[in-house]
Structure formats: C-alpha cells, structure tokens
Amino acid sequence: MINIGVLALQGAVREHVKALQAPDVQVTVVKKVEQLHDIDGLVFPGGESTTMRRLINLYGFYEPLKAFAEKNRPIFGTCAGAILMANEIVGQMEPHLSVMDMTVERNAFGRQRESFEANLAMDQIGEDVEAVFIRAPIINKVGPSVNVLASYDGDIVAAQQGPFLACSFHPELTDDHRMHQFFVKMVREQAIHA
Amino acid sequence: MDKHVGTDRVKRGMAEMQKGGVIMDVVNAEQAKIAEEAGAVAVMALERVPSDIRAAGGVARMADPSIVEEVQNAVSIPVMAKARIGHIVEARILEALGVDYIDESEVLTPADEVFHLNKRDYTVPFVCGARNLGEATRRIAEGASMLRTKGEPGTGNIVEAVRHQRLMQGQINKIISMSEDELMTEAKNLGAPYETLLDIKRNGRLPVVNFAAGGIATPADAALMMQLGSDGVFVGSGIFKSENPAKFAKAIVEATTHYEDYALIAKLSKNLGPAMKGIEISSIEQKDRMQERGW
C-alpha cells in the first residue's frame, strides 16, 4: 500500500483524489505540514498559483515541501502545480519551489475564452490522452535532465525529471486517468527504492 | 489534435480551479492589486460595489469597459465582470473584452424580466445566483458553469446567504435520497429541468461548483458559509467598505481556507477594525430586495 497526498490549500483537490483511486493506493488530503511525513508522493493540484504560494508561505509549507522534494519523493503538478515546481517563471523575479529544471510561462495560451481541450500524444502514457487546458501555462524551456512527455502545437505541455512530473493541463478534469496511473507507478517504484 | 474551446469541461473546469478561494469585488486597479496580494483567486471588476449601488438607486448597468481593462491590466488572476440579467449585448461586450467569467447578476438592474441569457451560446463561462434548487438547475440548464447563492447583496447581513445555502443543500440531499420514479414530480414541483436533477441524483452533487455570495462581511461569515458546504466565497462590499481592506482581505482568505480552525479565525478576527455597518433585511422593502430579481 502506498500513500499519495494531494496538497489541499486551494483548487481542484477532489478531482485528483478521485483520479488517484486504485486498490493499493491510499489518498490523503494534505492540509497540515505534519501529514507530509506519512505520504510517499504528493500532487500539487490546479488552482491559482499566486494564491497557493501565499498559502504555502502562510502555513509554513515552504521549507517542508522543499525538503520533501530533496528526499526525491515524487511530486506531480498540474497547471498551477507545474508553475509551483518550475525553477524559472517568465516575467517573475523569483520562482516558487524550484524543484524542476524548466521555465514556465503563465497564461501562455491567453485568457479563459482561449482555454480549450484537445487529445495529446504522450510519450510513455498514450496516443490520445484527453487534456483540458484552462488559462494554461506552457513549458518554454527544459534542462538536459528533463524528459519532454508531450507538446501541443510546438509548445511543451508535459515533462518529467526523475521523480517529478508536471503538465500544463488538467488530467484530473477528465475520466482519462492514465497520467495519474503513470504517477502512481512512479511513486510505487520510488517507494521500493526508499 | 483537434482543439475545442468553450466546452462544458473547459468552462466548468475554470470554476473548479477557484474552489476553496475568495473572489473579491473591486472598482479599480489599486483595489485589484490589494485583492491579489491578499490571495484572492479572482476579482470582480465593477463600477460600484453592491452597497453603493443600493445607496445610489437608479439603474445599475455593466461597468465602463475602461474599468474592466484597468483591472485586467493590473492583475494576473482571473477577472470577472457583471452583465445585467438577459442583456445579450452587455454579455457579448464583456466576452469581447476577454473577461474570464461573466456574472449574470441580480445586483444590476435586469434588462429582461422574462428570459435569462442562453449561456450555452458563449465561449466565456457564466456564474449565476440562485436561492433554491429550482433556480440553480434552471441556470445550469441555460448553460451556467458556476453558481453562487444570491443572499442579499450589499447588506453585510449573512442571513439570506445562509437561508439559500441551507435550502439548496437540503433540496440536493432530498434528490439524492429519492428513488428515480419520484424525480419527475419533484422536477415539476421545483420548476427544475428533469435531466439536471437526474444528473444530481446519479453523481450525488451539483454538476457545477457553488459559491456563497450576498452579505459576507467578516472572516467568520466566510468560514460559516464554507462550513455549510459552499465551495468558496464571493465578498462584495465587505472588504473595501471596511477600515483596513488589505488586512481584512487577508483575514477572509485565511478563514476560508481553514474554516474549521477556530483558534486561527479567532486570532485573525482580532483588531480588524469595524466591518461594514450592514442592513437588517426586514428594513428593506420587498421591491428593493435584489434577490427577488431573476426567475
């Protein structure tokens, strides 16, 4: 049995909890720092990244989350969650948690009326993965140790670096849970090594 | 890689991302920045906050587009704006301006006393107010991607929002526990579209998020609405009619996130200065109650 947390400060928490459901997976809604000790992997949900960051600071999550990543515990960020993970954000002086070697650009597709859904061909995950993009960021640039998992129209929209997985869309809003299953597999493998 | 804009998933999904957050009414760039800094998940760009609309009387319309643009340029969080009920052109103007969400709002003077907007026609998503499950499901069937309680806007009095939230939650629970053969009669009684009720019954919840709005004036009010099952809160006049808006805004955001942490809410409620004065509902004549607008 592995235990996967969903950071529940703000955003689409319930959808991730549902998408992670599997017979050997326990899902924990993480609202307090102490809960990080009990989990093998963590999801940063979609929401508003600026809001989430403020709440991360306010509740003393910043250092504990950095430590969680330094121990190579797997993290999966979707949309705002991916922004929290990047080590560079276009137009912003400072990144947030800086756990992945990538540059993200916020709201890169435009405003809500430009938000869309499309099927994506994803490396290791599937040929026709359902992806919902909502005021989505793109990944402008990745470092040498980062694997690009998917692009849309020439822009990188999903990437993996060791135990860290990020995508600019919302797999949790669909019934296509292949990305979550991929992350569960990452957590399981990491838990065996740990 | 076919691209589809304005689908239900895209429009409803946008509101899902706002869950657990606070959406604040603002009338200029400076207030919008204070709201963003305090941790608001979105702002509602207005010409006047509801309590000022109530005080001014006359016809309340969509905000001047220059105010909407000023707010859009000031913040990176989503910007919402209000159109009059049934005002197709105001809604299209706001869509053309690129606002992220339109509130078809009873706070403004209705433009149509019979029909609400056909919100399915638009790429931009809509939020609508509701007092009960009949109103809520009619708005959903018209294409609303998010709901909020109507409450009684601009009063700083939480009682109507509580009434609407309690009633709707009770009606939802009743639908869930009914057998399917009872649903059609319930649809008739509520004036609710049958298919939407069936969806609620099968999934055990509303198909869109439901925020609290209309009278939230303190951090404790915001936490109360979360405890009653709201997905998040709209705060209109409460913040910028208080004495220290920045501090007040932060306190409301925190109370919304940790609505069950009473020691924390006690701490952040200290020395906030006076909240807005507020109005007792019975002192507002029936014809002046904004919640009676919409059908």
Image: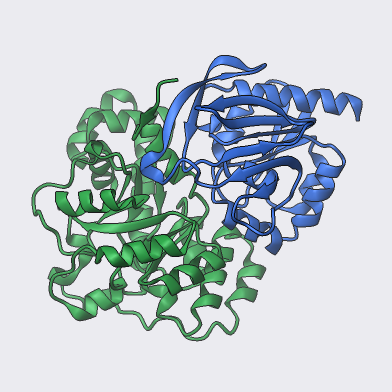
Chain colours: A blue, B green
Along the viewing direction, whichever of B159 and A94 lies nearer the viewer: A94
Residue in the picture at 11% in, 57% down: B111
Position of residue B284 in the picture relative to residue A172 (left or right)? left
- Image: B31 above or below A109: below
- Location of the N terminus of chain A by quadrant is top right
Residue B141 picture location, percent across and down: 25, 36
Residue in the picture at 11% in, 47% down: B115
Residue B206 appears anywhere in the view: no
Residue B36 appears anywhere in the view: yes
Residue farthest to the top? A127
- Location of the C terminus of chain A by quadrant is top right
Residue A114 picture location, percent across and down: 39, 39
Along the viewing direction, whichever of B139 and B133 lies nearer the viewer: B139
Position of residue A101 in the picture relative to residue B121 (left or right)? right
Residue in the picture at 37% in, 62% down: B44
- Image: A92 above or below A28: below
Residue B158 picture location, percent across and down: 38, 68
Residue B169 picture location, percent across and down: 39, 47
Along the viewing direction, whichever of B101 and B170 lies nearer the viewer: B101
